[in-house]
Amino acid sequence: MAAHIPTDAGGSAGPDRATVYAWLVFALSFGLLISDYMARQVLNAVFPLLKTEWSLTDAQLGLLSGVVAIMVGLLTFPLSLAADRWGRVRSLTLMAILWSLATLLCAVAESFETMLIGRALVGIGEAAYGSVGIAVVISVFPARLRSTLSAAFMAGGLFGQVLGVAIGGAIAEAHGWRMAFAAIGLAGLAMGALYPVIVRERRIRALAGAAAAQPSGAVKVSLRELVGNRSVRLAYLGSGLQLFAAGALPAWLPSYFNRTYHLPVDRAGSLAAVLLLLCGTGMILCGMLSDRIARDRPEAKIALAIGYACGTALCLTLAMLLPPGTAQLVLLGAAMFLVAGTVGPVGAMVANLTPLAIHGSAFATLTLANNLIGLAPGPILTGRIADAIGLAEAFRLLPIPCLLAATAFAMMRRSYLADLAGRQSGPAATG
C-alpha cells in the first residue's frame, strides 16, 4: 500500500500566487504591528527614569511591562474569535485606535497606578492584533510562504521594539519620558486611521477564496481542531516556553546595559535596539530557512525549532559566564538572533494543522500560549528575581525555559507527520 506523504500546504492552500495588493496588505499590516510594539516597548526605554522619579522597584517595573502581555494572553482568544465573525479589518482598526489612545494616557500618568491602568489598556488594544493580523496576511498569500510570512510579520514586533527603544530613549533623553509616549501614541493614531482606507474586508475575502468565508456553523464545528491533535498542542507549549526569554530580554536589556555597562538612557536604549534588530533579522532568516529546508520534508521544521531553542540556551549561558565586554555582547547578539527563530516554523505548523476558516482563532490560541507562558511571566519573573539576586543573575536562569521548549518540540517528532496527514485527509481538509 502506497503511503500518503503529507505536505506543508495543508488543506488551506490559499491563492496560487502573491499579488501586488497582497503585498500592500502585508506592508500596512506590518506597519501597524510596528506601531503596536513601539507602544509596548517605549516603556522599557524609560525604565531608569521612572525608577528614579517614582522610586519604583524592579518588580513594579516588570509588572508595568508584563501587564501588557497578561492582557494580551487573557483577551487574545475571545477578541480574535469575535474578529473572525465581526470583520478582521474593522477589528484591527479599532485595536490600533485603542492602544494609541492608551499610550497617550501613559504620557500624562502621574503615578504608578495610573501608568499601570494605561499599560493594561495598551494590552487590551493589542490583545488580538498579532493573531488577527497574521490571519489576514497569510490568507492572501500562497501556503508555500507561510513560515517566511509568519516570521516576517511577527518580526514587525521586533522592529517595533527596536524603534520603541531607540526613538523612545532618544526622545526621553532630550524631552522627557512623557513626550516619548505622546509621540508614539500620535503616530499610532495616524496609522490606525489609514489602514481601513486601503485594506478592505470584501477584497481580502475575495483574494483569500471561499475557504475564508465559511458559515459560522462550520466555524463552530471546526473550533475543536484548535487543540485537536497532539502536535498542535506541543507547538503551542514549546513556542510559549521559548518566548519566555524573548519577552524577558527586550524588557530588561536597556536596564542591564544602564546598570552593568554604566551607559546613559539613550545609549543603553540604542545598544538594546541593535540587539533587537538582530532578533528581528534572525526571526525572518530563520523563517526563510524553514520554508526552504522543509519544502519537501515537513518534519524539518521541528528539527530547526529544536536547534533554535538549544542555540539560544547555549549562547545565553556562555554570555553570562563572561564579564561585560565585547565577547559578552557578541554572544548576547547571537542569542537574540536565535531567540525568536521558532516563530516562523511554529506559525507554519499551526497553520498547517488547522483550517483556514479558523486561522484567526488558531493564531489567537498560539498568542495565548506565547503570552501566558512566555511573554507575560518573562519580564515579571525576571524583575522579581532581579530584586532578590540581581539582574545579571536573573539573566543566567533564562536558558532553562529554552531547554524546556526544545524538549516540547522534540516530543512532536512522534506525531507531527501523522497529525499532518490526518489534517489533510480529514473532513476539514477542504477548509
Image: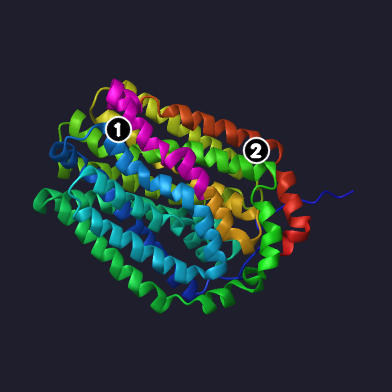
**What residue is shown with label 1?**
59
* Left or right, residue 92 beside residue 213: left
Which amino acid lies under the numbered mark 1 shown in the image of this protein?
Answer: Ala
Q: For this view, does 294 lie left or right of residue 344?
A: right
Q: Which region is colored magenta?
A: 367-395
Q: Where is residue 221 drawn, in percent x and y?
A: 71, 59
The answer to whether 202 is drawn above or below residue 329 in the figure is below
* Residue lying at the far left of the rendered structure: 174
Query: What residue would you read off at disc 2?
Result: 412
Tag 2: amino acid: Met
Q: Nearer the viewer, residue 182 or 138?
A: 182
- The secondary element bearing badge 1 is classed as helix
- SS at mark 2 in the image: helix
Q: Is residue 125 left or right of residue 258?
A: right
Scheme by which the image is coloured: rainbow
> Few, some or many C-alpha atoms within 10 Å of disc 2 (few <14, some 14-19, many ≥20)?
many
Residue placed furthest toward the right: 1
What quarter of the picture does the C terminus occupy? bottom right
Few, some or many C-alpha atoms within 10 Å of disc 1 (few <14, some 14-19, many ≥20)? some
Residues at discs 1 and 2 in contact (Cβ within 8 Å) = no
- Taking the spot 44% from the left edge, 29% from the top edge, the residue there is 313
